[in-house]
Amino acid sequence: WFAETKITSNKAQSVDPWQWTLPPRLIEPQRLSVERDQWMTIGYPGLDTYVKTLDLLKIGSKLFDATFQSQQVAITQREIYTCEFLRRHSHPTLCAYRGVTVDGNGFVSGLIFDRYDKTLSDLVRERQQFDADACLGTVEGALEHLHSLGLIHYDLHPGNIFYSTRSRQFVLGDFDAAQFIGTPLQVKYGAPGWRSHLTDGVTTPNACTEHDWYGFEVLKLWLKKKGSGRARMSDQLPATEAIVKEATELLRD
């Protein structure tokens, strides 16, 4: 059930959802889910895996929006197709996909990937030491592999670069925005500031590798400004927003 209300001083209302501004509404996860098809790999979660699921609390009232529901289904369907494709064309620079989990009604409830300890964002925020050149080399290799398969990642940013503290290896993950080169970009787009401005003012832009290489240039500047993996807790580092703004100005020239 999902319930929402305005902030109130009425204590009775604050503890009883049925007294809230809007009565509770029944959540129907199937409206946001993809029915499992035969071509989808069934995966089995374990301690070394991560199951990607929808965050219903984060989605909030959009759970009941028909347009959002159809878009979410399209995103999930595309991500599963992309991951199944990449499973047949795996590469050590990409986060490995293990399959899907399925609920009792035959709908996909999650996507299973190898588990990693940190994101690149985590490493930088925590001022942990790491090999920035190795990180960039991995991301570059991942993009080259995707492009050789006719795909673009289209959501390159530090939160989608994962790191194993044990092996000290990076991988590129999160493929829900990946699209085939030459097809119209649709449904989900890359993070603002990390995607190319080539789409500005274009009604139906197509997927092209320039979008990824633009994000890669932003990433290089971001890593440099954030200390190149050698920042200390006492260092004063610029905010990501400022770095992205600087990158936007530089890359427009």
Image (tube, rainbow, N blue to C red):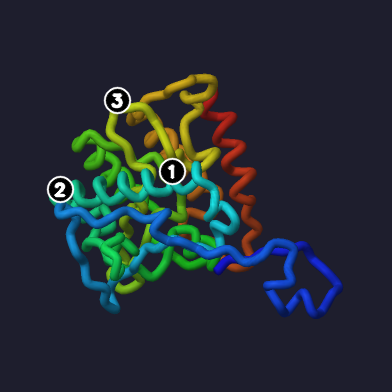
Q: Which label number is shown at residue 134?
A: none
Q: Amino acid at mark 1?
A: Gln
Dot 2 or dot 3: first in sequence order is: 2
Q: Residue at x 46, y 48 (%)?
A: 69
Q: Residue at x 60, y 68 (%)?
A: 233
* Residue 142 placement (x, y as % from top left): 27, 46
Residue 131 visible in image: no
Which quarter of the figure has residue 16? bottom right
Residue holding disc 1 = 71
Q: Residues within 10 Å of mark 3 (few under 14, many from 20)?
A: some
Q: Amino acid at mark 3?
A: Gly
Q: Nearer the viewer, residue 142 or 54?
A: 54
Q: Amino acid at mark 2?
A: His
Residue 205 visible in image: yes
Q: Residue at x 58, y 58 (%)?
A: 60
- Label 1 SS: helix
* Residue 17 placement (x, y as % from top left): 68, 73
Disc number lying in front (2 or 3): 3
Disc number lying in front (1 or 3): 1
Task: Determine whether 237 is above or below 213 in the image.
Answer: below
Residue holding disc 3 = 182
Q: Which label number is shown at residue 89?
A: 2
Task: Report, in whole angstroms, how far the alpha carbon at label 1 lies from the one at label 3.
Answer: 21 Å
Task: Report, in whole angstroms, how far the alpha carbon at label 2 lies from the one at label 1.
Answer: 27 Å
Which quarter of the figure has residue 149? top left
> 182 left or right of 67?
left
Dot 2 or dot 1: first in sequence order is: 1
